[in-house]
Amino acid sequence: MKKRPGFTFIELMVVATIIGILIAVLIATFDPIKQIQKSQDGKRTSELNTLRKVLEDYYNDKNRFPAATDICYNAPSAPRTDLFGNTACSCNICGNNPLSPLISPYLPSLPCDPQSPQKEYLYDYDCSTASPGWYRIYAKLSLENNPAIIQVGCGGGCGPSPDFAYNFATFSNTEPETISCSDYIRLWQKNAISVNRLSAATSAIIITTYIISQIAPQNAALD
């Protein structure tokens, strides 16, 4: 009785190659990391939109927005003058933190960034008075091409100057602090070679090119 021939080494290599190609195609199609980031960003935008509605109810009841002790788990930053000339302080929101206050009956618990503590929601508010009249809540979305970033005006970055470390916000009675042309130049100078080594004309060309490279993706997203 003859033995049935098995697979040859070449046949096994062909099968392994085909399986590898199929796996690569599946990963490229579904991109699990991107799907996780998309889910996290959806949670962020949803939670901040919920907070916006909650804080409107809070304001209607108390005739003010929350101060740091009402909504943050940590102490506020030192007062600063924001880009609009207002006195602002900031602190972090995360309902999972044991030091987080409650904001009942408006919410059973405050939201928390899905990547906390690596990322945290930033509460930026009017600290010129004991009764804050405006606020901003910032988040950092993982996917830079999220249309929500453009919709809230954070395409070039937003948040407290000079870092503008966030790209999504909800707010009331004010607008997000966003990066300006002068800040593009400052950031370029920080990350590029010294402008002092270049001629004035060359520096102007490079700076203009840098600004266009940052603004173009925003315009493309709007189109």
Image (tube, grey):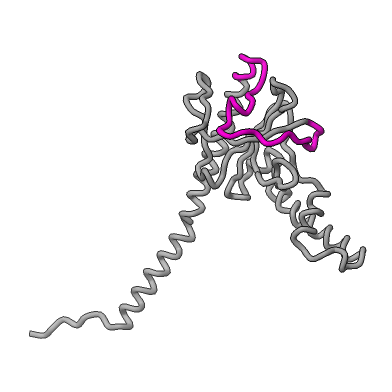
Magenta segment main secondary structure: loop
* Residue drawn at point x = 45 percent, y = 63 percent: 25
Who is closer to the viewer here, 112 or 46? 112
64 or 36: which is nearer to us? 64
Image coordinates for residue 204, horizontal then vertical, percent: 88, 60
Check residue 186 for magenta coloring: no
Q: Which residues are magenta?
A: 57-86
**Furthest residue to the left?**
1
Q: Is residue 65 a member of the stretch shown in magenta?
A: yes
Q: Residue at x 72, y 26 (%)?
A: 173
State left or right for residue 181 relative to residue 219: right
Left or right, 54 with respect to 150, comes to left
Quarter of the image with the N terminus in it: bottom left
Residue plotted at (92% across, 63% down) = 200
Above or below, 157 against 86 in this view is below
Residue under the image location 63 percent in, 24 percent down: 66
Q: Residue furthest bottom?
A: 2
Between 207 and 25, the one nearer to me in the picture: 207
Quadrant of the image occupied by residue 5: bottom left
- How many marks on residues? 0
Q: Quadrant of residue 127?
A: top right
Compared with 147, 205 (above or below) is below
Q: Position of residue 101 (x, y in %)?
A: 53, 27
102 up-or-down from 44: above or below = above
Residue 172 % position (x, y): 69, 27
Q: Residue farthest to the right?
A: 200
> Image quadrant of residue 19?
bottom left
Q: Above or below — where is 13 with respect to 201?
A: below
Image coordinates for residue 151, horizontal then vertical, percent: 68, 39
